[in-house]
Image (cartoon, rainbow, N blue to C red):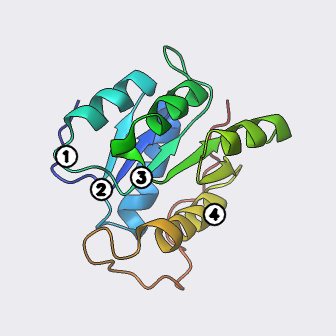
Amino acid sequence: MNQISCACVFHVDDDEDDRFLLQQVFRQYSPACEIKPLANGEELLEALATAPVLPSLILLDLNMPIMGGFEVLRSIRQEPRYDSIPVVVLTTSDQLTDRQMASELKADGFIPKPPTLKQLNQIVLELRQNWLEGKCAAITQPLHTPPTDIPAKSISVK
């Protein structure tokens, strides 16, 4: 696992393609926001426990092996040290019951994974504006500039 000195966003998702795509979009449009990709909830809890600086945001998938998103969200919210970290669920689910459970477990947001890269670009811009502005190093691209130069490619959906 790569050690990032000051990760801005911990992205937890068991799908390697989804981790790669999100990392590429952040690199392109929010290069100052470093991403720490993690494959499951256990990796997240270990990364939080050993991080020299806590992340500014956690993006959390729900359906993962070893420790699923709801279980890890419950663990995070039981630890007072992590109270100030926003957790946004980013998942393939659009089920009302999943939204309700995420809300009950005090997730700060719930976003179904988008079917297109253009929509993922927009989500990253909104995440940056809502959760990361002023928390990562200087943002180099204005928030209102729409992303245009990432190759069009569908996002893998589980």
Camera sees residue 39? yes
Left or right of 139, for residue 122: right
**Mark 3 and mark 1 in contact (Cβ < 8 Å)?**
no
Look at the picture and state if 38 lies above or below 68.
Answer: below
Left or right of 6, for residue 72: right
| Amino acid found under the numbered disc labelled 2 | Glu
Decide which of tag 2 and tag 3 comes sooner along the chain: 2
Decide which of tag 4 and tag 1 comes sooner along the chain: 1
Q: Nearer the viewer, mark 3 or mark 4?
A: 3
**Mark 4 and mark 3 in contact (Cβ < 8 Å)?**
no
Look at the picture and state if 40 lies above or below 34.
Answer: above
Q: Which mark is residue 85?
A: 3
Query: Disc 1 and disc 3: Cα gap in Å?
Result: 17 Å
Image point (50%, 74%), residue name: 129
Residue, disc 2: 34
Query: Disc 4 and disc 2: Cα gap in Å?
Result: 21 Å
Look at the picture and state if 108 lies above or below 68.
Answer: below
Query: Disc 4 and disc 1: Cα gap in Å?
Result: 27 Å
The answer to which image quadrant residue 132 occupies is bottom left
The x, y position of residue 82, in whole percent, is 38, 45
Decide which of tag 2 and tag 1 comes sooner along the chain: 1
The x, y position of residue 114, in whole percent, is 69, 51
Q: Which mark is residue 118?
A: 4
- Observer-nearest residue: 14 or 115? 14
Q: Could you tell me which quadrant the C terminus lies in?
A: top right
Q: Nearer the viewer, mark 1 or mark 3?
A: 3
